[in-house]
Amino acid sequence: MSNLKTFILVFIAILLVYICGLPIDIMEVDAAQYATISYEMFESGSYLQLYCRGYDYLDKPPFLFWINQVFFSIFGVHDWSFKLGNLLFILLGIYSTYQLGKLLYNKNAGLFSACILGSTQAWFLITHDVKTDGILASAIIFTVWQWKCFSINKKWSCLLGMSAGIAIGMLTKGPLGLIVPGMIMCVDLAGNRQWKMIFNWKYILSAMFILLALSPMLYGLYLQYDLHPGKTVSGGHVVDSGLRFYFWTQSFGRITGENKWHNNDSFFYFLPEIAWAFLPWTIFVIQSLIMAFRSHFKKNLIPLAGFILPYIALSFSSFKLSHYIFICFPFIALMVGNYLSGKKPELLSKILAYAVQFLLAGAILFLGYCFNVPWIFTLLLVSILLIVFMIIQKTSAAKVFLTTLMMGVGMNLFLNLFIYPALLNYQASSMAGKEYLKEEPDKKAPLIEVNTWSFSMEFYAKKSVKNYGSLEHCMEVEKGSFCWLYMNRKTYDEFRQMNIPVLKEKEFDQFPATRLKPGFIWPETRQNYISKTYLVKVYLP
């Protein structure tokens, strides 16, 4: 498939799905926390020292929060303006994957790779459920592309691009932004015996540029923590040095065990995560990996190193989350793109690919029923997909590639338009924040969480949220004032026993949208998984 118009239509379709995800409510926990930090930074003007819900915040570097300030300043504070900066970097990563694929293989392989990366389940998800790993993955693939250009043509512009990519990666998620591309570069240099490039004096200038780019963040860390050792940060952990945390504890501490986060999952934890997150292309990963080792091994050094080395390093970490492995996906996409652009899939691969497509079509019908999507929309989408499937079968040589791509795009268009909005009606904290803003537009009465904690409520209320661990403590501090209390069912029952008059009250259904369970998805048993929360306006005597 070498028709450029076809690729343009494909990228437009992918971009359309991304755009449809922008207005979706921000999900708890990570994305909502990042949105809250960005909002607090926007309100306070504190760009070098980070805070979250009034606590010192140290877990992530500030780049995501910095770029959000640009879009908040232009468009105001909205869920979609929060996602715009992340989306632009996702697009940069897709473009960089195309350019690197073209450089390593050919233009067609680059286009295939970019299409594959952009249409993975992971990339559709992180464009609206914002993770720092999306920007980090884009920064890494951009860095490697620019470095490969520099190794070929020695242009200063490529060196500057490489340095900017490393700086953005380090400003997004710490030393991983240097370590991962550094490992890939070393493997490629060693494999191609380019020993002189390892000691190129121009890297000194690159290091100086990177240090200059990091300096505002490092100065902020020094001011916030190193000048005040023993600070307690969000989560109740004591920090003596922000600089040490950034350069060591945040990344290497997860391998040494020094980092406070531990879940000690298996070394093979990321294999099932790749299986679902790289859909609908998962079935081609093994074949492309085998081909990368067998055919033109030197050309595949960068994709192999970009997949295998981070996978091993992350698998030794004492704390793992599914989205950590996303930094490998551009390199997996390069291998799969090269494989699918260079040969027709084998019979077994075709059978499995069509089976996946059939299951995705079935999932659209199933989810449409479960979340009460009007049947006309569900059947219309499935019918369109079926018609396009038949047209591709009759007219295209790249049948498996295009039908797989079509089904992934169609599935995620359906999710973004109907399923995620339905799911987020059960994210009670964001619903409560919107209700507060509607009922209290002047935001004079304080908004208080009692014996619960969230991030999205503050973002949607556009109001700093106070928090108390008990009703007694809340009433002691806030007595003699009108306020809004947000409580879970247990705390609400305790509150009602106090016989305090309620001025306004709203009940919400609560279920964590990012931790779905089969019993919740099925409408007949959903109520068994839903809890209740309450937002009440009272005068505390």
Image (cartoon, grey):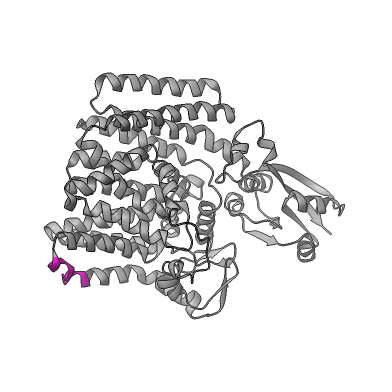
Query: Residue 430, can we see it?
Result: yes
Tell me the residue at 21%/32% (across/down): 4
Task: Tell me: residue 317, above or below residue 85.
Answer: below
Query: In the depicted view, which residue is nearer to us: 258 or 418?
Result: 258
Tell me where residue 285 appears, x and y as whole percent: 32, 43
Residue at screen point 17% across, 53% down = 298
Give the percent coordinates (x, y) of residue 13.
35, 33
Q: Answer with the quarter of the image where residue 214 lies.
A: bottom left
Q: Bounds of the magenta span?
A: 195-204
**In the image, residue 113 lies at what x, y percent?**
27, 42
In the rendered image, the quadrant that contains the N terminus is top left
Query: Which sits in the foreground, 37 or 265?
Result: 265
Residue 8 in the image: above or below residue 533: above
Principal SS element in the magenta part? helix
Residue 99 appears in the figure: no
Q: Measuring from the top left, give residue 36's x and y in whole percent.
A: 54, 56
171 horizontally vs 114: left or right: right
Residue 350 falls inside the magenta stretch: no
Task: Name the residue rendered at 58%, 49% in the picture.
Answer: 460
> As rendered, which of 71 and 26 lies closer to the eye?
26
* Residue 119 figure quarter: top left
User: Residue 446 appears in which quarter of the rendering?
Assistant: bottom right
- Residue 312 is left or right of residue 429, and the answer is left
Q: Give the side of residue 385 with respect to residue 24, left or right.
A: left
In the picture shown, does residue 137 fall above or below 474?
A: above
Q: Is residue 429 above or below residue 408?
A: below
Q: Quadrant of the C terminus?
A: bottom right
| Residue 200 among those drawn in magenta | yes
How many circles with numbers are drawn on the protein?
A: 0
